[in-house]
Image (spheres, rainbow, N blue to C red):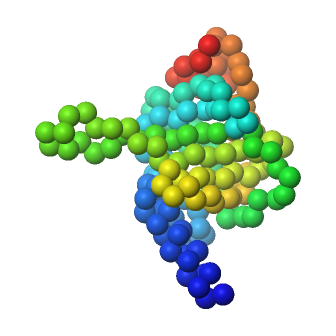
Amino acid sequence: MKTRIFSLSAVLLCLFLLSGCVIVKENLSFDPGGISKAQRIEVAGASDGQLLGTLDTEEDIDAFVESVFIESWKLSELPAGLEREGAFTLYQQGAVRPGGGEPKVHKICTLYSYKDAAYLTITTAVGAIDITFSIQQSAADYLHSLTQVMPCDLISNAGMLGCKCST
């Protein structure tokens, strides 16, 4: 039992150190600064991986962070039988290295939302570790709205002002 707890603690520590997300010990919620550092968020259907849009402006990423209420996330177990609905892959540009040319863009993590459920699973780019959270229903509704395929002229009405259509 102690080995399992120690292993889980070590995995969680590595997860947060490598993914760019910061954990607050008092309530195990993410610091919004970790996700708001993303420079691009690709929105795709979880079942087919079809790219639905890309959030890449500061305004859109800020709106995403505000709408998912990161501060209210609570660690949770994923109920059985839920179906993934959306995949939100976050990218961040790497550090500029002297004489190294253009910095590479790195995948930070992917957030998965679920149909008809207020849960979110984060899968890190390093180690493919999954952590599930219960989230506010309004955040789940917002994520659901981003996964709906819409004509390009309606995207700004859904809060995706800088979204690029994949059509």
Q: Position of residue 154 (x, y in %)?
A: 67, 15
Residue 5 visible in the picture: yes
Quadrant in which the C terminus is drawn: top right
In the rendered view, tell whether residue 15 sits above or below residue 4.
Answer: above
Residue at (41% x, 42% y) in the render: 106
> Total label count?
0
Image-based side of 166 in relation to 135, left or right: left
Quadrant in which the N terminus is drawn: bottom right
Residue at (60% x, 39% y) in the render: 88
Q: In this orientation, which residue lies closer to the viewer: 97 or 162? A: 97
Residue at (13% x, 39% y) in the render: 99
Image-based side of 111 in relation to 48, left or right: left
Residue 138 visible in the picture: no
Q: Position of residue 44 (x, y in %)?
A: 64, 32
In the rendered view, tell whether residue 67 sits above or below residue 161.
Answer: below
In the current view of this chain or complex, which residue is farthest to the bottom? 2
Residue at (80% x, 45% y) in the render: 83
Quarter-of-image position of residue 112? top right
Quarter-of-image position of residue 130? bottom right
In the current view of this chain or complex, which residue is farthest to the left? 99
Q: Position of residue 21 (x, y in %)?
A: 48, 56
Q: Position of residue 96 (x, y in %)?
A: 23, 42
Q: In this orientation, which residue lies closer to the viewer: 17 or 46? A: 46
